[in-house]
């Protein structure tokens, strides 16, 4: 188990490194900071001097190693070109909003997906089950930013129940979290359903029923706990998906998180910030997966001992 | 118990019919989509680029103040919404299909190599897949488009370069299973080159799974193209793309809700139709399901 975790950890670090490299080269190709930072009337010799001072005239590989050294040793991604503060500071300011949105969406997802999935499994081909199946189809075809816009029109503009954009109160969180979770609710629902269907035919469930346990206890303690293992693994992966989805959701709802910062920064070519965001996202994805695998191993002795 | 046995047969039949019905629905939507894309110049009631400031922001024909010549109303420049949506189907289909062709080419090649050779090749390719999976799609796609510049061709490239790992994963697993089968071993012992075994013996056997996956991926690529366009990094105005139209409609949500609603509806219906057809295709090709 320990060697397994260690191996996965090394691989996770490798993935983060590779991603920082790819994004560094992409951004190197993409934006010329000299053009961005200097006023348009400066002549070419000034630009050359500026590049020399900033170290931008060196080969891209040298620049990358330099960058990596600063990140690893000091946690320094460089200063934002636009805001003139360290990129890391911007990340620190914006990350809580994104984290809050992603966690709210994850909680909401399970509040909906788990009960509906269980009901769909025990009442197969019932109305609930058909609705669940149908929602999977709809969920796959629905662009989430369109859903967000439609929710704004219905609940914000027509009914005026909820604020359409902004940040601060619980009411502001409702529409973005609902939009973001709509993306993964169908997936989890189907997972709970098929997991429960598998488990419910097992002998130990019949035993539990035969010894006279009440049905709720059979379903929750004996069946769902076993059916939930793939759910834990998938949730680890979904945390990353949610961060990606947050980029879109934040844009639609003007949510002041990392996603919106990412889009703005890519547009204007503020690449220390982009770089820092990409690495932050990648680290969340990779270590989210790792954490989910460890948790799955902890709750399931078959994985732990096998 | 007998009773429940009969019931399950009845349910299987019912489910089959349900699937069939959804498949027919999907195929019909797909037919409408493809023929709209093909024949738009003849079908569309208006020129999608012609502006008419006097008639700007007209509501759909059935609403008060609607104009019967503009069934879905007009946008902020007075262009006919229905005509623009019809023209948008072309962009969506071209981008969807050609980016998935690129994804298949990249993904299947890597999957075949990883699954057939195993060992170091497999480790390297799996690492690349892991890197890709940890890189949020949207950030990679936006950076790529920002580097390459927003044009139809570059959007296809960006979506192709970001979507292939799904195909690698499926191909890799299937190839691993087939690698040990007798007909592959026989071909090997006859001394055929690896390329020939991969293309002539293994590829035809995994083609059905790839085809089914490809339909779902076309739908996803259409949604992603519209997303890039929505963020302003995809198809550029005035070219009618569903995502661009949605973004334009977003500025008029308070009063002119139909702009964003109908262009989004077009994306949703297209994706739904393709997905339903894909499901039906899978059921038709799966011999186990076909028998039951």
Image: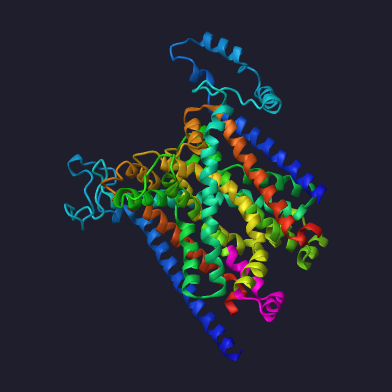
Image: A199 above or below A101: below
Q: Is residue A38 left or right of residue B178?
A: left
Image: B157 above or below A204: above
**Which span is picked out in magenta?**
A191-215
In which quadrant will I find the C terminus of chain A?
Answer: bottom right
* Residue A88 point in image, percent of width and height: 59, 28
Q: Is residue A222 visible?
A: yes
Question: Is residue A204 highlighted in magenta?
Answer: yes
In front of the other: B11 or A126: A126
Q: Is residue A217 left or right of residue B21?
A: right
Q: Is residue A4 left or right of residue B91?
A: right
Q: Residue at x 52, y 41 (%)?
A: A98
Q: How many marks?
A: 0
Quarter residue A296 falls in: bottom right
Image: A83 above or below B249: above
Q: Residue at x 52, y 81 (%)?
A: B11
* Residue B291 point in image, percent of width and height: 59, 79
* Residue A177 point in image, percent of width and height: 47, 49
| Prevalent SS, magenta region | helix
Q: Residue at x 44, y 62 (%)?
A: B273
Question: Is residue B181 highlighted in magenta?
Answer: no
* Residue B112 point in image, percent of width and height: 70, 54
In front of the other: B113 or B2: B2
In front of the other: A134 or B76: A134
In front of the other: B247 or A89: A89
Q: Is residue B216 visible?
A: no
Scheme of image coloration: rainbow
């Amino acid at each position: 188990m320990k060697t397994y975790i260690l191996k996965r950890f090394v691989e996770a670090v490798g993935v983060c490194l590779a991603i920082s490299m790819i994004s560094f080269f992409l951004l190197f190709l993409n934006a010329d900071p000299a053009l961005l930072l200097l006023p348009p009337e400066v002549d070419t010799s000034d630009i050359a001097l500026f590049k020399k001072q900033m170290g931008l005239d060196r080969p891209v590989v040298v620049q990358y190693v330099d960058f990596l050294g600063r990140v690893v040793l000091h946690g320094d991604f460089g200063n934002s070109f636009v805001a003139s503060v360290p990129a890391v500071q911007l990340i620190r300011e914006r990350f809580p909003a994104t984290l809050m949105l992603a966690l709210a969406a994850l909680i909401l997802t399970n509040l909906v997906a788990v009960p509906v999935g269980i009901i769909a499994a025990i009442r197969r081909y019932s109305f609930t089950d058909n609705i669940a199946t149908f929602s999977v189809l709809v969920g796959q075809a629905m662009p989430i930013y369109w859903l967000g816009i439609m929710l704004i029109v219905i609940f914000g503009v027509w009914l005026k129940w909820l604020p359409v954009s902004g940040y601060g109160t619980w009411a502001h969180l409702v529409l973005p979290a609902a939009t973001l979770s709509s993306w993964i609710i169908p997936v989890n629902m189907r997972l709970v359903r098929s997991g429960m269907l598998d488990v419910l035919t097992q002998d130990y469930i019949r035993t539990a029923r035969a010894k006279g346990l009440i049905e709720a206890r059979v379903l929750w303690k004996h069946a769902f706990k076993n059916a939930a293992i793939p759910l834990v693994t998938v949730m680890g992966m979904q945390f990353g998906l949610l961060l990606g989805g947050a980029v879109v959701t934040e844009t639609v709802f003007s949510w002041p998180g990392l996603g919106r910062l990412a889009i703005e920064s890519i547009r204007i070519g503020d690449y220390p910030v982009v770089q820092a965001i990409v690495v932050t996202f990648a680290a969340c994805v990779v270590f989210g997966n790792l954490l989910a695998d460890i948790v799955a191993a902890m709750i399931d002795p078959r994985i732990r001992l096998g | 118990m007998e009773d429940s046995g009969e019931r399950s047969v009845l349910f299987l039949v019912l489910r089959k019919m349900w699937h069939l019905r959804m498949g027919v629905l999907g195929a019909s939507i797909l037919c409408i989509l493809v023929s709209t894309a093909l024949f738009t110049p003849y079908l569309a009631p208006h020129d999608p680029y012609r502006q008419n400031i006097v008639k700007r922001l007209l509501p759909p024909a059935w609403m008060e103040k609607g104009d019967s010549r503009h069934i879905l109303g007009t946008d902020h420049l007075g262009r006919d919404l229905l005509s623009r949506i019809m023209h948008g189907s072309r962009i969506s289909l071209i981008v969807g299909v050609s980016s998935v062709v690129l994804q298949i080419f990249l993904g299947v090649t890597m999957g075949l190599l990883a699954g057939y050779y195993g060992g170091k090749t497999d480790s390297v390719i799996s690492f690349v897949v892991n890197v890709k999976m940890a890189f949020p799609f949207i950030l990679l796609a936006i950076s790529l488009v920002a580097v390459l510049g927003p044009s139809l061709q570059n959007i296809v490239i960006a979506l192709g370069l970001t979507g292939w790992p799904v195909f690698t994963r499926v191909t890799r697993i299937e190839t691993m299973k087939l690698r040990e089968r007798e007909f592959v071993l026989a071909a090997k012992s006859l001394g055929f080159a690896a390329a020939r075994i991969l293309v002539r013996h293994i590829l035809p056997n995994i083609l059905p799974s790839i085809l089914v996956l490809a339909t779902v991926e076309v739908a996803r690529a259409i949604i992603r193209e519209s997303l890039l366009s929505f963020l302003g990094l995809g198809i550029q105005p005035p070219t009618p793309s569903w995502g661009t139209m949605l973004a334009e409609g977003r500025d008029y949500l308070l009063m002119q809700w139909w702009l964003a609603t109908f262009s989004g509806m077009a994306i949703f219906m297209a994706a739904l139709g393709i997905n339903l057809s894909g499901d039906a295709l899978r059921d038709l090709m799966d011999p186990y399901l076909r028998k039951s």
